[in-house]
Image (tube, rainbow, N blue to C red):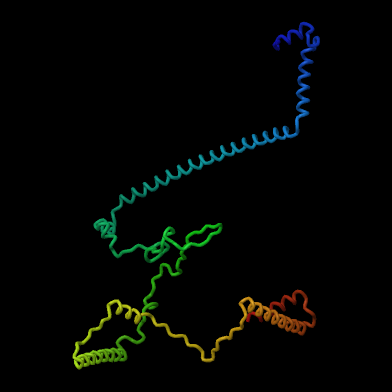
């Protein structure tokens, strides 16, 4: 097999077995034309595959460049965050240095005297979260058992709602029965004396009955807990009973459902609105002497709505 240099020398020196002076170039041109014909005869699918492969390579190159840009941005952000954290640490160190240089307050000195267990038993309590008077006694999310559906077959614990009166102390007058009469008045003294007299009379009667029956005087068997319950019941604020009008009569059952009642009510309102509209139209004609135009109809409907709302 001849090398490229031998082919070149033969083409320069003299005729060759491949067709004279131009034999080598003709052979090369023939090869190129054959390859071109094969490419022309190639199926359309091969061309599409080549195009898609080129497009995927370009897309992958763009994705890699995008990842590089994102990584560079994250590195810049992390450097900024580290710089800010360093500044915050320096500021906190300065504040701590200033606080340690100051003399401790009397409350700090007393806190240092007591042990931790003594401080935990003290009656001083910090305010709770959200301005509460006491600590937050609600259960945490892992402790809650009641859940609600959130969709997709999933559920989550039900969150508590905050009270509207957080941070406000309840007055005793809202839960304890307050005196209805003036303290130290003659009426109060007399009522107390009558009460003591009745109790003594009942005790004397009990002793007399016990002696006549040949037994002993029985002491009250009510426990301390029952006494406290009775006392708290007496101290509970008594709300006045609401007076009911003697002329009140309960409405009779119509036998209709809520949707049917609302439908009937809307039908009646529509009929009443039509009657009022006709009345206001006649009034407008009497006042102006002509039929209402667009502005007049707006004025009429305003009057109708005002009448319907009252």
Q: Quadrant of residue 184?
A: bottom left
Which residue reaches farthest front? Answer: 214
Q: How many marks?
A: 0
Residue at horizontal 30%, vertical 52%? Answer: 102
Please indicate whether residue 53 sits to the left or right of residue 162 in the image.
right
285 shown above or below 115 = below
Q: 277 or 289, which is in the foreground?
A: 277
115 shown above or below 237 = above
Q: Position of residue 24 (x, y in %)?
A: 77, 13
127 shown above or below 65 = below
Residue at horizontal 39%, vertical 71%? Answer: 169
Q: Quadrant of the N terminus?
A: top right
Which residue reaches farthest top? Answer: 13
Q: 169 or 208, which is in the foreground?
A: 208
Q: Position of residue 21 (x, y in %)?
A: 80, 10
Q: Position of residue 207 (x, y in %)?
A: 21, 90
Please indicate whether residue 122 sits to the left or right of residue 172 in the image.
left
Please indicate whether residue 115 sits to the left or right of residue 298 in the image.
left
Q: Quadrant of residue 106?
A: bottom left
Q: Quadrant of residue 174?
A: bottom left
Q: Position of residue 202 (x, y in %)?
A: 25, 91
Q: Quadrant of the C terminus?
A: bottom right
Residue at horizontal 61%, vertical 82%? Answer: 255
């Amino acid at each position: 097999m001849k090398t490229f240099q031998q082919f070149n020398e033969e083409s320069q020196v003299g005729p060759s077995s491949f067709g004279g002076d131009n034999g080598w170039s003709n052979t090369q041109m023939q090869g190129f034309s054959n390859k071109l014909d094969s490419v022309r005869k190639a199926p359309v699918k091969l061309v599409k595959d080549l195009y898609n492969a080129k497009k995927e390579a370009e897309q992958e190159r763009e994705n890699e460049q995008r990842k590089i840009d994102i990584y560079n941005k994250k590195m810049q952000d992390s450097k900024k965050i580290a710089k800010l954290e360093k500044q915050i640490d320096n500021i906190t160190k300065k504040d701590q240095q200033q606080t340690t240089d100051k003399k401790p307050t009397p409350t700090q000195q007393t806190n240092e005297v007591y042990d931790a267990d003594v401080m935990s038993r003290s009656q001083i309590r910090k305010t709770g979260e959200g301005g509460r008077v006491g600590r937050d006694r609600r259960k945490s999310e892992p402790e809650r058992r009641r859940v609600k559906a959130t969709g997709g077959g999933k559920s989550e614990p039900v969150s508590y709602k905050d009270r509207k009166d957080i941070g406000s102390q309840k007055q005793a007058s809202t839960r304890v029965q307050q005196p209805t009469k003036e303290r130290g008045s003659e009426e109060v003294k007399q009522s107390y004396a009558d009460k003591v007299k009745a109790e003594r009379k009942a005790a004397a009667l009990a002793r007399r009955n016990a002696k006549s029956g040949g037994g002993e005087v029985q002491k009250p068997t009510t426990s301390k807990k029952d006494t406290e319950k009775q006392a708290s019941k007496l101290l509970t604020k008594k709300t006045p009973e609401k007076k009911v009008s003697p002329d009140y009569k309960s409405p009779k059952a119509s036998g209709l459902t809520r949707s049917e009642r609302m439908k009937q009510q809307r039908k009646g309102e529509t009929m009443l609105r039509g009657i009022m509209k006709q009345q206001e139209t006649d009034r407008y004609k009497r006042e102006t002497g002509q039929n209402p135009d667009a502005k007049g109809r707006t004025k009429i409907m305003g009057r109708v709505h005002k009448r319907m709302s009252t």
